[in-house]
Each structure stands twice: as C-alpha cells, then as structure tokens.
C-alpha cells in the first residue's frame, strides 16, 4: 500500500490556517486528488460535539468509540486520554486518500506550508522542520531559506501552493 502524501499548514493562531486549508482542499479536489484532513484543536479542551446526539450519548455511557452513518456521511466519535498524530493519520489512511492535510501540529516533521503574520512569527516559525513554502502577511521575510515565499494577499498564492503540493506528491509517487 502506498502511503498517502501527508502535508501540513502551520502557523500561529489567527494566521489564516483554516482559510488556506479550505482553499487547498478545494483546489486539490478540483485537480482530482482525494484529500482527507486533520484539524488540531489548539484552543484547549475538547472540540464541541452536540451532547444530545446518540453518538455522544453512547460515549457518555462508556463506549470508547461510536460511528454514525447516514446518506454516505460517516462520523467517528472516540475518546481516550490522547490521540497521537500518527494514530490520527493511521485512522484517516484507512479511507485510502491520496493526500492528508494536517492543519496545525507545527512541530511534526511532515512537509509544511508555514503562515507568517509578522517578523515575530518569522523568528519562531522559519526554524521548523521540512518547510516547503511560506506565505506571509506583512513584509516578505528577509532570508534565503531555500524554499519559496508567497504573499497571502496575492490571489495567485493558493494556486501556486496547490501546484507545489502536486509536485511534492508526484515526487513521492512510486516509480514504475
């Protein structure tokens, strides 16, 4: 089995990660790529789940996992002390996507696009591992980091980043 191409959109809170992730998912889907995603809930505590739904009631009763399916939509609700990123990737891999986009988890070692709001972000983020590109808000970073920089305000940036991801996927594809 060929492992899906796993990549990240990383940056500090309110840097535009979710907006960029949505746009990349849309564009990759338009290019024919089956994409799954992982969103890191970095706001503390557990993500909100409607408590009146049956799956939540099953979890509250002690089930370690509950699935809800309807009209082609499958929702998995599971609780344990922690879910390491590798476990989350393994679960999503069972759905056989071609790519998995991780929003957040900036210290993981997967290829990543980093979002930089200002010089302070630049100092904290450009030292991360495996950066394939950076998108900046204010002024272009003053470094020759060995990867491309794009202005987040440029309408062509999502297209350019999508092309870069497709190139990375192609490089990872097994050669016949």
Image (cartoon, grey):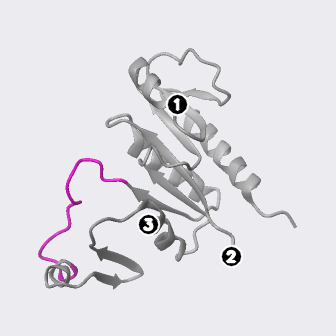
Taking the spot 19% from the left edge, 55% from the top edge, the residue there is: 45
Could you give the CA–CA distance between mark 2 and mark 1, rounded to whole angstroms? 33 Å
User: Which stretch appears magenta?
Assistant: 40-55
Pinpoint residue 77: horizontal percent, then vertical percent.
29, 75
Taking the spot 59% from the left edge, 27% from the top edge, the residue there is: 149
The reply to whether residue 77 is visible in this rendering is yes
Q: Is residue 37 above or below residue 156?
A: below
Q: Is residue 149 above or below residue 22?
A: above
Could you give the CA–CA distance between mark 3 and mark 1, rounded to whole angstroms? 25 Å
Residue 29 located left or right of residue 79: right
Q: Is residue 45 magenta?
A: yes
Label located before the other in sequence (2 or 1): 2
Q: Residue furthest front?
A: 81
Residue 47 located left or right of residue 175: left
Residue 73 located left or right of residue 46: right
Q: Label 1, on which residue?
A: 127
Q: Label 3, on which residue?
A: 88
Taking the spot 64% from the left edge, 62% from the top edge, the residue there is: 32
Could you give the CA–CA distance between mark 3 and mark 2, rounded to whole angstroms? 18 Å
Return the residue nearer the eye: 131 or 117: 131
Taking the spot 59% from the left edge, 46% from the top edge, the residue there is: 111
Q: Is residue 174 above or below residue 79?
A: above
Return the residue nearer the eye: 64 or 48: 64
Element on which disc 2 rests? loop
Element on which disc 3 rests? helix
Label located before the other in sequence (3 or 2): 2
- Of tags 3 and 1, the one toward the viewer is 1
Q: Quadrant of the N terminus?
A: bottom right
How many other residues sit within 10 Å of disc 1, few (<14), some (14-19) or many (≥20)?
few
**Dot label at residue 1:** 2
Do tag 2 and tag 1 residues touch (Cβ < 8 Å)? no
Pinpoint residue 26: horizontal percent, then vertical percent.
51, 53
């Amino acid at each position: 089995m060929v492992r899906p191409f796993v990549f990240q959109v990383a940056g500090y809170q309110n840097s535009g990660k979710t907006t960029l992730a949505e746009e990349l998912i849309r564009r990759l889907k338009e290019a024919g790529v089956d994409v799954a995603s992982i969103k890191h809930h970095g706001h503390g505590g557990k993500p909100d789940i409607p408590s009146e739904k049956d799956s939540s009631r099953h979890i509250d009763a002690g089930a370690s996992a509950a699935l809800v399916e309807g009209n082609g939509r499958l929702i998995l609700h599971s609780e344990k002390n922690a879910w390491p990123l590798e476990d989350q990737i393994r679960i999503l891999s069972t759905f056989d996507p071609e790519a998995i986009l991780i929003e957040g988890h900036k210290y993981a070692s997967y290829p990543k696009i980093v979002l930089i709001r200002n010089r302070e972000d630049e100092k904290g983020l450009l030292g991360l591992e495996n950066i394939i590109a950076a998108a900046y808000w204010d002024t272009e970073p003053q470094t020759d980091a060995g990867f491309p920089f794009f202005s987040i305000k440029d309408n062509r940036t999502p297209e350019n980043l999508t092309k870069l991801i497709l190139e990375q996927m192609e490089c990872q594809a097994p050669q016949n």
